[in-house]
Image: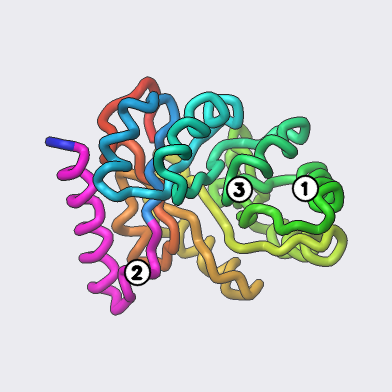
Amino acid sequence: MSAAARLAAVRAAITRSAVEEGRDPAEVTLVAVSKTFDAEAIRPLLDAGQRVFGENRVQEAKEKWPALRQDYPDVRLHLIGPLQTNKVREAVALFNAIHSLDRASLARELAKERARRGGDPLPELFIQINTGEETQKAGVVPQSADSFIRECREEHGLEIAGLMCIPPVDEPPSPHFALLAEIAKRNGIKQLSMGMSGDFEQAVMLGATYVRVGSALFGSRAYAV
């Protein structure tokens, strides 16, 4: 199947899921997860009209996206992997959205970077919620979510665009999506980054506004998305 056909199939599935729930499909943005794939693997999706892409690492994105953006200047890049505090300046310069705000030290550094930039807007910020409370996974545990959101807003002056989660691989994802939506609703947060190749349709039905899809678009990779 061609890249264009895979893209069309994923977009059709998003549309079906949204319509089934009475949602406008235009409310859902597809983030094509291009981590580990080189520019030549990405170009067919760009040529097919995809413009929002997700990367896991700042350095990898720095190596391949500047040249691609010269040809496709309307591309929007989302950092969906963990962000080290010493990479904040580079990330803010490169990405349009950061989905992995997960600790106070990172919030402080983002606020400092905004000040260094003279108050220019930061990328859209999503707080990562560790809905499964997995010790090996980044993210704020659910019981600390409200206080961390409040800290980001009130102490650091950060505008929080959305929440993100990655459910445990060995559990049904829907309860985790529902939990994320509940936390967002009570904190007045509109955007939900949830759902990957194996479960994005369920995520759309539970309110996702961004779905992060890799293997369904690009095929297999060294590690799953």
- Magenta stretch containing residue 19, yes or no? yes
- What residue appears at the point 24 percent right and 65 percent down from the top-left corner? 15
Number of residues whose C-alpha sits closer than 10 Å to that of mark 2, classed few (under 14), some (14–19) or many (20 or more): few
**Would residue 83 be visible to someone looking at this image?**
yes
In this rendering, the answer to whether 183 lies above or below 172 is below
Foreground of the two, 108 or 130: 108
Quadrant hosting residue 161:
bottom right
In space, the residues marked 2 and 3 are separated at their CA atoms by 21 Å
| Residue 13 picture location, percent across and down | 22, 57
Secondary structure, mark 1, is helix
Circle 1: residue type: Leu
Query: Label for residue 110?
Result: 1
Foreground of the two, 24 or 143: 24
Quadrant hosting residue 35:
top left
In space, the residues marked 2 and 1 are separated at their CA atoms by 30 Å
| Residue 216 picture location, percent across and down | 26, 40
Secondary structure, mark 2, is helix
- What residue appears at the point 46 percent right and 38 percent down from the top-left corner? 70
| Residue 5 picture location, percent across and down | 15, 44
Magenta-colored span: 3-29
- What residue appears at the point 80 percent right and 50 percent down from the top-left corner? 117
The residue under label 3 is 98
Residue sticking out furthest to the front: 70
Circle 3: residue type: Ile
In this rendering, the answer to whether 81 lies above or below 179 is above
Q: Quadrant of the N terminus?
A: top left
Discs 1, 3 touching: Cβ within 8 Å: yes
